[in-house]
Amino acid sequence: MSGAFASGLVVDLVLALLAAEAAVLVWYRRRHGRGVPIGEALAFLAAGACLLLALRAALVGASWAWVAAPLAGAGAAHAVDLALRWRRR
């Protein structure tokens, strides 16, 4: 089990689940016309995906730049998420 963490495999599995969640949210919104707006869903899922990528980089011992870049992406995605939510209100 420790090998799955050291290689980043666990993060890859969680990223796959995150992609499946995104697909279900988009499908549900298009099919039923209700639920989380697609832009907001993709923004908060992108922030989570970027955090997971930073975690994966840290777990496999990547340089600091490979950890910092997804963290910056997570911050940008979070800012987009907040802007979309504030604009809706």
Image (cartoon, helix red, strand yellow):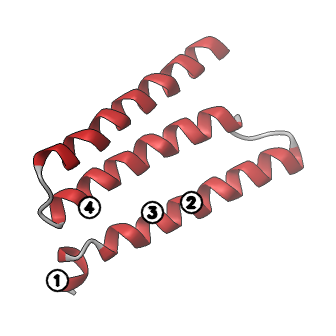
In which quadrant of the rendered view does residue 14 lie? bottom left
Q: Is residue 81 above or below residue 17?
A: above
Residue named by callout 3: 15
Residues at marks 2 and 3, CA–CA distance in whole angstroms: 6 Å
Q: In this view, does 21 lie to the left or right of 18?
A: right
Check disc 4 and give the amino acid type: Arg
Label 3: state its secondary structure. Answer: helix
Task: From the top left corner, tell me how far across and down residue 12 is, in percent.
Answer: 39, 69
Q: In this view, does 67 lie to the left or right of 84?
A: left
Check disc 2 and give the amino acid type: Ala
* Between discs 3 and 4, the one toward the N terminus: 3
Residues at marks 4 and 1, CA–CA distance in whole angstroms: 14 Å
In which quadrant of the rendered view does residue 65 lie? top left
Residue named by callout 4: 56
Label 2: state its secondary structure. Answer: helix
Check disc 1 and give the amino acid type: Ser
Q: Which mark identifies residue 19?
A: 2
Label 1: state its secondary structure. Answer: helix
* Between discs 3 and 1, the one toward the N terminus: 1
Check disc 3 and give the amino acid type: Leu
